[in-house]
Amino acid sequence: MTDRSPAHNQRVNDKPLGTTLAPYVRAASIGAAAGLRSMAPPAAVFRSGERRRIVLAILAFGELVADKFPQAPSRLFPPALILRTLTGGLCGGAIAVRANGVRGWGIAAGALAAIVASYAGYALRMNLTETRRLPGFPTAAAEDAMMLLFIRFGTRDV
């Protein structure tokens, strides 16, 4: 009979319990950010190469500005949702690897979180602007702040 002491239950694969999910929680966080703004997570995650950094920063800034206009298309419009899912998955995979996780699980966590955050962000924004009649610009700015918190958590220490 093997020893199943409390100390045994506190470790998984010789790692302290709780650290094994950390790469995927970070991947989900960066994926959730992609669900709110599709181009900001790639700008935060893929920082190598001068041209790539500049192009991604311009795209992220352009999306932040364009999102404030009422003519901006819905994030649930299929091409937009596909883009958010792809960027969430790609960024999630990259973050998971940096945090010593498995790329495939990071891709899955990031993509799924991007889809969930896209629908949740849409529902929250519609509730605040349509039902509660709050102005669109402050609501979008609050969403930007939430996206930045997701990015900060997802990229911290990796």
Image: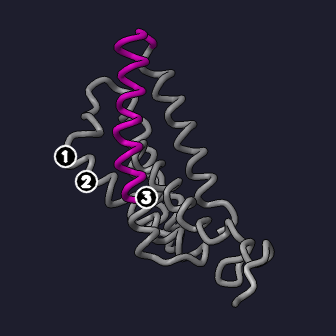
The disc at residue 78 is: 1
Most distant residue in the top direction: 133
Q: Position of residue 61 (x, y in %)?
A: 45, 45
Q: Position of residue 122 (x, y in %)?
A: 35, 32
Chain-order first, disc 3 or disc 1: 3
Q: Which residue is mark 2?
A: 82
Query: Closest to the observer: 79 or 13?
Result: 13
Q: Which residue is mark 3?
A: 56
Most distant residue in the left direction: 78
Q: Residue at x 45, y 12 (%)?
A: 134
Q: Which of the image's four quarters has the N terminus?
A: bottom right
The disc at residue 124 is: none
Q: Tag 2: residue type?
A: Ile
Q: Is residue 145 above or below residue 150?
A: above
> Contact, CB < 8 Å: mark 1 with mark 2?
yes
When asked about the image quadrant of residue 3, the answer is: bottom right
Between marks 3 and 1 in the image, the one whose residue lies nearer the viewer: 1
Task: Tell me if residue 157 can be seen.
Answer: yes
Count of residue discs: 3
Specify whether 148 is left or right of 71.
right
Q: Is residue 126 above or below residue 147?
A: above
Q: What distance separates the C-alpha of mark 3 from that of mark 1?
A: 22 Å
Q: Tag 3: residue type?
A: Leu
Specify whether 9 is left or right of 65.
right
Residue 81 is a magenta residue: no
Structural crowding at the residue carrying mark 3, measured as other residues with C-alpha within 10 Å and reported as few (<14), some (14–19) or many (≥20): many
Q: What distance separates the C-alpha of mark 1 from that of mark 2?
A: 6 Å
Task: Tell me if residue 62 can be seen.
Answer: no
Q: Secondary structure at mark 3?
A: helix
Q: Residue at x 62, y 52 (%)?
A: 152
Q: Which residues are magenta?
A: 110-134
